[in-house]
């Protein structure tokens, strides 16, 4: 069965869409890149690489990683953001590529929630890509609420990412998430019905 990549921008609702998909497709295999990154940053070898690139200031007195401080640094400095991505992304890519390969001959769908799918070339490992999108205004408002930050900081975080419009241009499907969960669930059911009608073969790349 197919590997479906799910991506979008920060606070566009990727996780909510994945939850709706899992409700209608509970047997699907699921990979979450954010959860994988969180786990990786607890590994000694990864923490050592982070220390080498970012210094001791991103660690607390008990030697635990201060994730909030690290997040503030990378969203304020594109070079630092890229440095962290170079540490994490090859490891994440290996993980989800192995998972996708393992489930390629499974009768179940494989869903991968990967925020930086296009930025890391991960779309080549997917049979289809869904971009979860919303308006810029809704995205800013959601991010302000989620992280308790000002509009200027939310906009800086959004603008540090690949433009959502560019991701939409490359997508096979777009789930528009300006509304409520019921509307998102309806789109998840529609896409699932579409996929279940298809005879899946390796997607042709041009």
Image: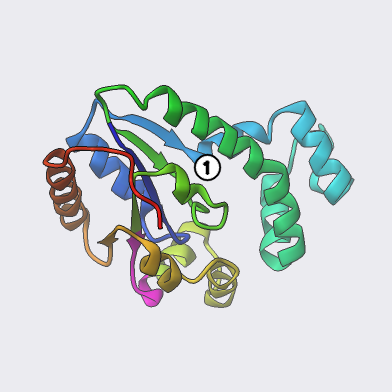
Q: Is residue 12 above or below residue 41?
A: below
Residue positioned 23% across, 29% down in the render:
26
Magenta includes 135? yes
In this view, the residue in front, 77 or 130, is: 130
In this view, the residue in front, 116 or 59, is: 116
Q: Where is residue 196 in the image (x, y as percent from the top left)?
A: 14, 38
Q: Judging from the image, what secondary structure is the residue with disc 1 in?
A: helix
Magenta includes 20? no
Residue positioned 67% across, 54% down in the render:
71
Residue 111, picture quadrant? top left
Q: Give the range drawn in magenta.
A: 132-138
Q: Is residue 102 above or below residue 2?
A: above
Question: Is residue 89 left or right of 55 when viewed as pictured?
Answer: left
Residue 159, picture quadrant? bottom right
Q: Mark 1 points at which residue?
A: 34
Which quarter of the image is occupied by the N terminus?
A: top left
Residue 200 visible in the current orientation: yes
Which quarter of the image is occupied by the C terminus?
A: bottom left
Residue positioned 50% across, 34% down in the render:
96
Residue positioned 23% across, 37% down in the render:
200
Question: Is residue 90 left or right of 80 when viewed as pictured?
Answer: left
Q: Position of residue 154 (x, y in %)?
A: 54, 70
Q: Position of residue 128 (x, y in %)?
A: 32, 48
In this view, the residue in front, 125 or 117, is: 125
Q: Position of residue 54 (x, y in %)?
A: 83, 50
Question: Is residue 189 left or right of 45 when viewed as pictured?
Answer: left
């Amino acid at each position: 069965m197919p590997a479906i990549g799910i991506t979008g921008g920060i606070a566009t609702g990727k996780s909510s869409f994945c939850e709706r998909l899992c409700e209608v497709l509970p047997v699907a295999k699921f990979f979450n890149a954010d959860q994988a990154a969180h786990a990786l940053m607890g590994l000694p070898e990864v923490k050592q690489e982070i220390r080498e690139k970012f210094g001791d200031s991103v660690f607390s007195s008990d030697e635990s990683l201060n994730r909030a401080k690290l997040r503030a640094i990378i969203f304020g400095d594109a070079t630092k953001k890229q440095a962290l991505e170079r540490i994490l992304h090859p490891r994440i890519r290996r993980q989800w590529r192995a998972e996708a390969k393992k489930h390629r001959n499974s009768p179940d769908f494989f869903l991968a929630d990967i925020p930086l799918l296009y930025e890391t070339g991960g779309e080549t490992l997917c049979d289809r890509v869904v971009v979860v999108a919303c308006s810029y205004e809704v995205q800013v408002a959601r991010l302000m609420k989620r992280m308790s930050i000002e509009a200027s900081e939310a906009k800086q975080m959004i603008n540090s990412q690949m433009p959502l419009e560019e991701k939409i241009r490359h997508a096979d499907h777009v789930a528009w998430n300006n509304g409520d969960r019921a509307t998102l669930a309806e789109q998840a059911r529609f896409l699932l019905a579409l996929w279940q009608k298809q005879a899946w073969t390796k997607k042709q790349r041009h």
